[in-house]
Amino acid sequence: MNKDDKFRFNYSAPTASERKQVESIRSIYAPEKTSSDRERLVRLNNKVHAIPMAVSLSVGVTGLLIFGLGMTFALNWENLVAGIILGVAGAAVMAIAYPVRRLIFKKLKAKYSSEIIALCDSILNEEVDK
């Protein structure tokens, strides 16, 4: 081995698009960052409003599909009795969609209200101190 023989190592950094892809994959598996009080407040508020709406929409759409099936029985398949029964059942399911939403909203509001109020107070107190 001569003195001129040296170990050479070439390193190339990933391109910007490769780096972005690696970072996006890493963010999926990385532990969740601690969020600020304001972010937590917004998440809780969205949770209290979004869950009842999603359940209510699901119940309403289910009722609408049952109602439509009853209409199909009555009009296309000429089975009037089954069509009326399914139509009334579908209308009843659609009618309970809003009360279901109010009930779930009330329960979630009671469950998260103390935490939301505490977060609001801490955020408002931080603003006053500044």
Image (tube, grey):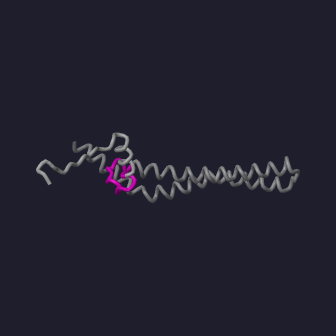
Residue reaching furthest to the left: 3
Indicate whether residue 69 is drawn in magenta.
Answer: no
Residue 63 at x, y percent in the picture: 69, 52
Please state if 77 lies on the left or on the right of 43 as rendered.
right
Q: Nearer the viewer, residue 20 or 43?
A: 20
> Which residue is at the far top?
16
Q: Residue at x 13, y 47 (%)?
A: 4
Which stretch is magenta? 26-41
- Which of the pair 56/107 is nearer the observer? 56
116 sits to left or right of 89: left
**Could you tell me which quadrant the C terminus lies in?**
top left
The quarter of the picture where residue 19 lies is top left
Q: Is residue 34 magenta?
A: yes
Q: Quadrant of the N terminus?
A: bottom left
Which residue is located at x 37 percent, y 51 percent?
A: 27
Residue at horizontal 48 percent and vertical 57 percent from the top = 108
Residue 24 pos. (x, y %): 38, 48
The quadrant holding residue 111 is bottom left
**Within the image, what quadrant is residue 16 found in?**
top left
Point out the residue furthest to the right here.
78
